[in-house]
Amino acid sequence: MKEPEFRCGRNCDVLANLFGYKFHKHDQDWTYIVAEAERIDDYVNAYNSEITDEDTKFSLMEMIIQSLTDQPTIALMLSKWDSVKPLLTKDFELHKYTIYYWGCWDNSDINDCWNITPVMREFWLEMNKENYWSQRYVDEKTGWDLGMVSTPIKEYVDQLKDKTLKILIPGAGNAYEAEYMFREGFKNLYIIDISPLPLENFKKRVPDFPSAQILQGDFFELNDTFDIIIEQTFFCSFPPIDNNREKYVAKMHDLLSENGKLVGVWFNFPFTGDLTKRPFGSTQKEYEALFSSHFTLDVFEESYNSVPDRRGQELFGILKKRKR
C-alpha cells in the first residue's frame, strides 16, 4: 500500500491561543502532547466553526485524533468518531497522510498499535474501497468466494416458479449464483459490485448476460426496486461501526418492492471485536434484533444444507419487507 505524501502541520501558535495552551516554536509533536481527551468536543466545534485555513485545520486534526484515541473506553471513542468522520470525509485529501499514519500500516500486529488504528484502517479502505476490493481479487485474498453457487441459495431458487421476478445480488463478486440463475431462465436479474474485476470475470463466463444488468458501483447509491434481493457474503463485509449494519438493513428495505423479500445466508458466529479480520459475523439473536424493525422473519434458522466447510456457521433467512 502506497504511503501518501507527508505533510507538516503549522500554525500551532493559533491553536495554542485558541485553547489556552503554551507553545514554543521548537516544541516537537506539540499537537499530540497537548491534546486532551476530555476536550475533543471543543476541538471538533472549533474545526467546524472557527478554523478556515488548511494549515491550521491540519494541525487541529492531529489534536482531534490524539484526543480520540485517548478516550477512556472504546465505546466512547466510537461514539466520538461519529462527529470526527464527517470532517475527515469532507477534507480527505488534506488529511490523507494523517489518516494513513494512524492506520499503522507498517505494523502487522494490530494489538501493538493505537486504539483508533482499526477504525482508521477501515476508514482508509472505505475511502479507497474500489481499489481495496480489486486488490483483494488480484492478491487472491477471497476467502468468501465458494467458487460455486451456494447450496442454500440454489435450493431456494430451484423452488421459485415465477422467473420474471426482478432480482438483485449485491456485492456479487464472481456471481456464481447469478450465473446459475441466469442459465435456469431468470432473465430479470441484476448484479452489483464495487470492484470491476469480478464483474469482468463474470462477463467472460456468461457472455450473453445483459451488460445493462451488470452494475459496477456502490450498493448504497443504487436507486431501483426489486422483488427479491439475494444475500451471499455481502453483510459480512461491513465492519460493525458507523451504524453500517443499520444502514444495510435500511437500504435493503428501500430497494425492495412492496412484499419484497431479502433471502440468503448470513454467517452465524459472533463478532470478535477485531476490525481487521473479515468476515464480520453475528449471532442469530443479534440478527433478529437488527432486522425485526424492517422485516418479518418468515424463516431465519441454521442452514441444514451449507457446504461442508461452512456447516454450522450459516443461517438461512427469508425476510419479508414490512410496511412502514
Image: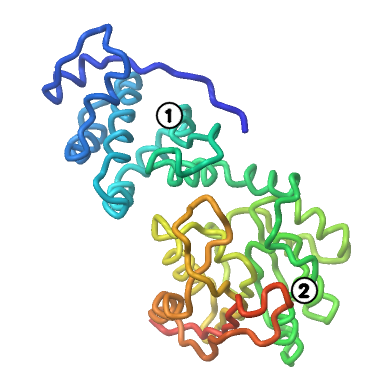
User: Looking at the image, is 247 positioned above or below residue 87?
Assistant: below
Of pointers 2 and 1, the one earlier in the residue sequence: 1
User: Looking at the image, is 241 positioned above or below residue 63?
Assistant: below
Dot 2 crowding, Cα within 10 Å, few <14, some 14–19, many 20+: some
- Amino acid carrying label 2: it is Val
- Amino acid carrying label 1: it is Thr
Name the residue rendered at 49%, 32% in the picture: 100
Dot 1 crowding, Cα within 10 Å, few <14, some 14–19, many 20+: many
Quarter occupied by residue 63: top left
- Disc 2 from disc 1: Cα separation: 42 Å
Closest to the observer, 106 or 267:
106
Name the residue rendered at 44%, 64% in the picture: 247
Name the residue rendered at 15%, 16% in the picture: 22
**Residue 196 can be seen in this image:** no
Name the residue rendered at 24%, 37% in the picture: 44
User: Looking at the image, is 4 positioned above or below residue 217?
Assistant: above
Left or right of 105? Residue 289 is left
**Quadrant containing the C terminus in the rendered view:** bottom left
Q: Which secondary structure lies at badge 1?
A: helix
Closest to the observer, 275 or 125:
275
Question: Which residue bears the numbered disc 1?
Answer: 98
Left or right of 185? Residue 240 is left
Q: Which secondary structure lies at badge 2?
A: loop
Please state the horizontal and vertical placement of residue 105, each as a whole percent of the image.
Answer: 54, 35
Please state the horizontal and vertical placement of residue 123, each as a whole percent of the image.
Answer: 47, 44
Please state the horizontal and vertical placement of residue 291, each as a whole percent of the image.
Answer: 44, 77
* Scheme of image coloration: rainbow
Question: Which residue bears the numbered disc 2?
Answer: 149
**Quadrant containing the N terminus in the rendered view:** top right
